[in-house]
């Protein structure tokens, strides 16, 4: 269950501009009327992710798609790069929900290096260009899909139509992945936008369809961490309904990722690649 009902006190400010005035003798006729009601709220529960015998993450997330979240997280961190890196993915019982992922033996050194880096602060070395340091560890994105405005709007509509948890609670982020012909491959939701993207990427990786993905459409903003995840997955285009951060724009331009923001039926802004906007 991803949402549950809880009680609260609803205060009505009358009349909202978008609504007609209530019936005069109704209990809602007076401004400031308060009454108890129940609303659906999204659940947020922990998930422990283990690689072999070692715990690598504890994520707070919306219940569901635990295997996809675990595998997508490992993809986003660079510990997994292809489906063949996985030996086994298993949900484990216990008081704390847990997913154990067993990798191929030759990847033990990669895991050890990643764990050693976790104590370091920042995104790169203290000297030099941090963006170039990050990009040195990322695959070069494919040629951007460059969807036309109608295709972009249609993809955003497909994402929103699939966001059941957001319709119920109003607090879930959504991520949709499409192929190069703008055909929908998968949609994922979560209270965390990072988790939502990890779930979508992990599902395609487990299904052996990640190489088909070319476009990510996000319901919220594009941050540095979302751009990093898209690049690690080998996608060429990231389009978001929200705004990008400055670091997200810089990283996308340096990497050659197509970055589109403020996406709606009425408009969008292309921030990268540079030669597409100059």
Image (cartoon, grey):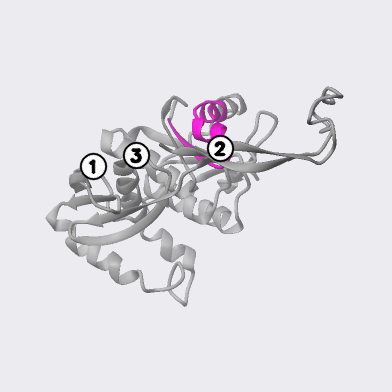
Q: Do the residues labelled 1 and 3 touch (CB within 8 Å)?
A: no
Q: Nearer the viewer, residue 217 or 200?
A: 200
> Residue 82 appears in which quarter of the rendering?
top left
Q: In the current view of this chain or complex, which residue is farthest to the right?
A: 24
First in sequence, mark 2 or 1: give its number: 1
The quadrant in which residue 171 appears is top right
* Residue 32 within the magenta-colored segment of the rendering: no
Mark 2 or mark 3, which has the lower sequence index? 3
- Tags 2 and 1 touching, CB below 8 Å: no
What residue is at 35 percent from the left and 51 percent from the top?
A: 73
Q: In which quarter of the image is the N terminus?
A: top left
The CA span between labels 1 and 3 is 17 Å
Q: Residue tagged by mark 1?
A: 83
- Upstream in sequence: badge 1 or badge 3: 3
Q: The C terminus is located in which quarter?
A: top right
**Circle 2 residue:** 169
Residue numbers of the magenta segment: 155-178
Q: Viewer-nearest of labels 2 and 3?
A: 2
Q: In this view, does 153 lie above or below 34?
A: above
Name the residue tied to disc 3.
Answer: 65
Q: In this view, does 238 lie above or below 49?
A: above
Describe the element under mark 3 as helix, strand or loop: loop
């Amino acid at each position: 269950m991803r949402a549950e009902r809880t009680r609260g006190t609803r205060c009505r400010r009358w009349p909202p501009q978008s609504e007609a005035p209530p019936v005069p003798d109704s209990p809602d006729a007076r401004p400031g009327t308060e009454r108890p009601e129940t609303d659906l709220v999204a659940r947020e529960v922990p998930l422990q992710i283990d690689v072999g015998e070692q715990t690598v993450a504890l994520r707070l997330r919306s219940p569901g798609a635990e295997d996809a979240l675990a595998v997508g997280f490992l993809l986003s961190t660079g510990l997994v790069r292809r489906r063949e890196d996985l030996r086994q993915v298993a949900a484990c019982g216990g008081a704390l929900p847990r997913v154990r992922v067993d990798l191929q033996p030759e990847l033990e050194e990669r895991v050890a290096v990643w764990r050693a880096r976790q104590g370091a602060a920042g995104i790169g070395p203290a000297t030099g260009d941090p963006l170039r340091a990050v990009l040195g560890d990322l695959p070069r994105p494919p040629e951007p899909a460059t969807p036309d405005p109608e295709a972009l709007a249609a993809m955003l509509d497909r994402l929103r139509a699939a966001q059941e948890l957001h319709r119920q609670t109003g607090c879930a982020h959504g991520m949709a992945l499409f192929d190069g012909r703008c055909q929908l491959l998968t949609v994922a939701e979560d209270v965390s936008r990072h988790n939502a993207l990890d779930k979508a990427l992990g599902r395609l990786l487990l299904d052996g369809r990640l190489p088909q993905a070319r476009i990510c459409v996000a319901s919220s903003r594009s941050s540095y961490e979302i751009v990093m995840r898209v690049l690690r997955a080998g996608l060429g285009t990231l389009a978001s309904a929200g705004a990008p951060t400055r670091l997200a724009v810089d990283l996308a331009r340096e990497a050659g990722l197509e970055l589109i923001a403020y996406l709606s039926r009425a408009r969008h802004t292309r921030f990268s690649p540079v030669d597409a906007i100059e």
